[in-house]
Amino acid sequence: MAAAFDRVFQIPAATTVPLKTWTEGFRIDDWCPPEVIEFVEWYFGLNPDTCAIVVNYVFLSRCLESVPDGVLRIIDTHDRFADRHLQYRPFRAEPNFFYTDRASEAVGLSRADMIVAIQSVEADYFRGLVDRAVYLLPPVFAEPAKFRAPGRLARFGFIGHGNDPNLFSISKFAHGWAASWRPDLPVLVIAGEICGSLNGLDLPGVQLAGYVDAVETFYAGVDAVVAPMLMGSGLKMKVAEALSLGRPVIGTRIAFEGFDTDHPAHRLDGVADTVAAIRRLHDDPDGLGILTAACADLLTRYNAKATTCEAAWLNAIPRRSARAAGSLAARAPDVSTTVGAGIIVREERSLRSLPTADEDGGILVATEKPSPATAREAGYPSERRRWFVSPEPDGSRQSAGALPALHEGPVSLSPEWIHRRSLPRPAREAIAGSLGDAQADWTADGCLIGYEADGLTVVSRVPSFLVARSRPTAAFLLGDGETARELRLTSTAALARAPSLAFAATRGALTPVPASLTFEPLEIDGSASPIPAAGKTPSRPKAVLFLSDDLVGLIRFAPARNTRLEVQ
């Protein structure tokens, strides 16, 4: 992004956007936090000569009401969101993304002067919904690879993100394909982030490839691509991507919405129809040749139309005097490294938003999360501090340095803590001790009522999700002068009477519940750190640290001199 724009800003939000609503739809502004409005007002106050604003997605359109008169307002829709939830009903599921009704979508779109649609069906829908100029602007796709018709299909593939449309569609298709698979039929290869949502899928004729280093590598390893989409809106990028890399695609009508095609293999009606088409084509060189030629022609015609639409769009935008191009270049990351307690911590300040590891093999453990007020005061900087951890090369000989410290303010946790656990246990425990100093989202006082080397029991008031065990959470025992010990929460029990122990949270949605929690040392790769036996070590446990996807919590233990619990 730094290479494409003069300046990049990040806008932190104080509250989490709700992914679900148990009503007929979200209100149009439910996903637009007030911090976005504050940023727009701040930006135009400093840059009054700004001539246009482009808002991605209609659910952020509320910020257009804060734009000064005379500024061109544009909404890039990406998708239609009215009645989107109706696609989920055949699957007996609720969407976990934004959806609304036609009236609300019309309110949002009416805030713009110009509306951009990604495919023609949605452009026609928007024109019928609001009295605004609607422009069709599908992306132009490069054609770096030449189409080559396979003589037969040995492997065909699907690569994608684990969103609901992808997950529902490929899961249904994989089961349908496996139901009648034989060894002489091609193997379905599924790759990408979606494999994490398909853990445990073990079907004949289906292979989970996981993440790949490059999409080009994936497409080079399959003879064709399947797009068995049963739901979704907008333009299906997985279809365009496969075509641009020279692979023939077989898919449903929904998958090819926005593409002008009449080949039978592009207008299939569901799982059974798609399975049957692949079985017919897999050993038919002539049929595969016709399909490949149709795909090549489709991409050429699509790109020609997209180029024409782009020219029409550029011609429609009002012209103002050209501004000198910015000369800012992406700044190299600021990096510092500290070593201690058997681990190497690399702190990086950069614009990168989705790294999971650094160039030296360190694993991302946390990212700085400034408050909205802090971000505004600093001018909404785009760069964030990130911390990567790796064990020292000789883990048996820990360096004498002190435990490297992380940020003392709020942080966002990486997938390492809950979903990946790729660091060795001693490294996780070493860095967890430092996370105990981060600004917690919730804190509580607690009392130890059972404390042995093989486990401990705590009474406290904790968020309800811990008692219900509805959210994956990692736990660590922290002690004065001791390395943290990773724990496993083995049981919880709600208490009928609340102990007189304090609870505080920075998020109002966290409801405290009086409960007892029992832990034992967690085994990773067959090893576990025993809990230091009470009375045999000079230090005492001081807290239990809880790490979940978006929360840091801390139970601090009451002094040991009074083990009685007063209830109210």
Image (cartoon, grey):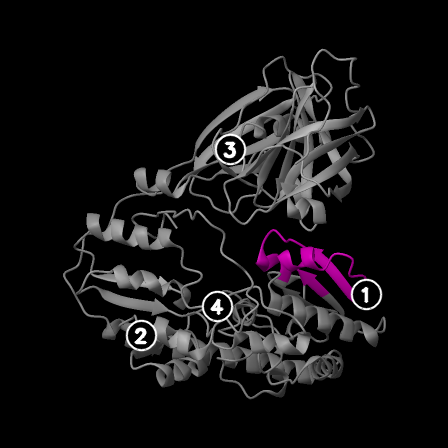
Q: Residue at x 63, y 53 (%)?
A: 212
The answer to which of marks 3 and 1 sits earlier in the sequence is 1
* Disc 3 secondary structure class: loop
Nearest the camera: 103 or 418? Answer: 103
Residue at the farthest left position? 321
Q: Is residue 422 something one can see in this rendering?
A: no
Q: Residue furthest front?
A: 568
- The alpha-carbon separation of the residues under discs 3 and 1 comes to 45 Å
Q: Badges 1 and 4: C-beta atoms under 8 Å apart? A: no
Q: Identify the residue under disc 1.
A: 203
Q: Is residue 399 above or below residue 113?
A: above
Which labelled disc corresponds to residue 110? Answer: 2
Closer to the chain start, of discs 2 and 3, is: 2
Mark toward the viewer: 3 or 1 = 3
Q: CA distance from mark 1 to mark 4?
A: 38 Å
Which mark lies nearer to you, 1 or 4? 4
Mark closer to the chain start, 2 or 4: 4
Tell me which residue sits at (71%, 68%) in the image: 171
Q: Nearer the viewer, mark 2 or mark 1?
A: 2
Where's residue 258, x and y in %? 48, 79
Q: Amino acid at mark 3?
A: Gln
Q: Are marks 3 and 4 in contact (CB under 8 Å)?
A: no
- Reading the image, the residue beneath label 3 is 439
